């Protein structure tokens, strides 16, 4: 099963590093000009985003289903320095059932967390509820148009979403919402440079 702790533990055990170790660019674009406060990083993986935020002065909670990933993330945070590691709390949780504390965080982000629609929409509602008034919600995912490229995404169209799908769970009376589908270069399994798109929602919760 794609959504179990066992699946993701095994995925992370398969290599010393699964991801690049760099912060996601949409996080960098969104958070660079924000005043550091409290952040929730959902699907935190090997910790690159949480470490980047902590290095900028944020207090971060990194949540992931995989204990292997969280152990690796904690090790890398420690390597980055004690002043960074002490700003991060790592938490293992099943995103299908876990709910963060409402109105707790100034920044809530989920990067490339893909679940079936029946589970993804409630998760997005819970993440939105965790944003304090004046805070920011950032959700990024693989755009459905990627299935028409040679990038090699699993043929699971139900797991893809657009930013507009995410925006539908937010009350426009409470949020200033921006939805985009920016393009970026990628390398397909044959080594060719192609263009893919991300689904990006940035929303500011009004005070």
Image (tube, rainbow, N blue to C red):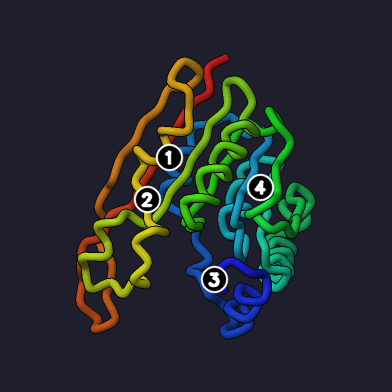
SS class of the residue under badge 3? loop
Whichever of labels 4 and 3 marks the residue nearer the N terminus, that label is 3
Whichever of labels 4 and 2 marks the residue nearer the N terminus, that label is 4
Whichever of labels 2 and 1 marks the residue nearer the N terminus, that label is 2
Residue carrying label 4? 54
Residue carrying label 2? 161
Image check: 68 left or right of 1?
Answer: right
What residue is shown at x 34% (from left), y 36% (from top)? 179
- The image position of residue 5, as x and y in percent, is 67, 70
Residue 2 circle label: 3
* Spatial separation of the CA atoms under disc 4 and disc 1: 27 Å
- The image position of residue 86, as x and y in percent, is 79, 51
Mark 4–mark 2 CB contact (< 8 Å): no
Q: Return the residue nearer the eye: 164 or 108.
A: 164
* Spatial separation of the CA atoms under disc 3 and disc 2: 17 Å
What residue is shown at x 64% (from left), y 40% (from top)? 39
SS class of the residue under badge 4? helix
Between label 4 and label 3, give the one nearer the viewer.
3
Residue 200 in the image: above or below residue 20: above
Between label 4 and label 1, give the one nearer the viewer.
1
What residue is shown at x 58% (from left), y 78% (from top)? 11
């Amino acid at each position: 099963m794609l959504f179990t702790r066992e699946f993701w533990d095994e995925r992370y055990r398969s290599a010393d590093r699964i991801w690049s170790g760099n912060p996601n660019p949409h996080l960098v674009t969104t958070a660079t000009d924000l005043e550091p406060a409290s952040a929730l990083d959902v699907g935190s993986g090997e910790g690159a985003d949480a470490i980047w935020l902590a290095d900028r002065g944020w207090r971060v909670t990194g949540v992931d289903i995989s204990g292997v990933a969280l152990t690796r993330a904690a090790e890398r945070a420690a390597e980055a320095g004690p002043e960074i590691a002490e700003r991060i709390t790592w938490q293992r949780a099943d995103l299908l059932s876990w709910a963060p504390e409402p109105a707790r965080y100034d920044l809530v982000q989920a990067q490339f967390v893909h679940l079936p629609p029946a589970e993804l929409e409630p998760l997005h509602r819970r993440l939105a509820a965790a944003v304090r008034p004046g805070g920011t919600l950032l959700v990024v995912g693989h755009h459905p148009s990627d299935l028409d490229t040679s990038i090699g995404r699993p043929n699971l169209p139900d797991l893809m979403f657009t930013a507009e799908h995410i925006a539908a769970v937010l009350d426009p009376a409470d949020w200033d919402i921006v939805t985009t589908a920016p393009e970026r270069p990628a390398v397909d399994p044959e080594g060719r440079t192609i263009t893919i798109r991300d689904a990006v929602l940035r929303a500011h919760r009004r005070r």
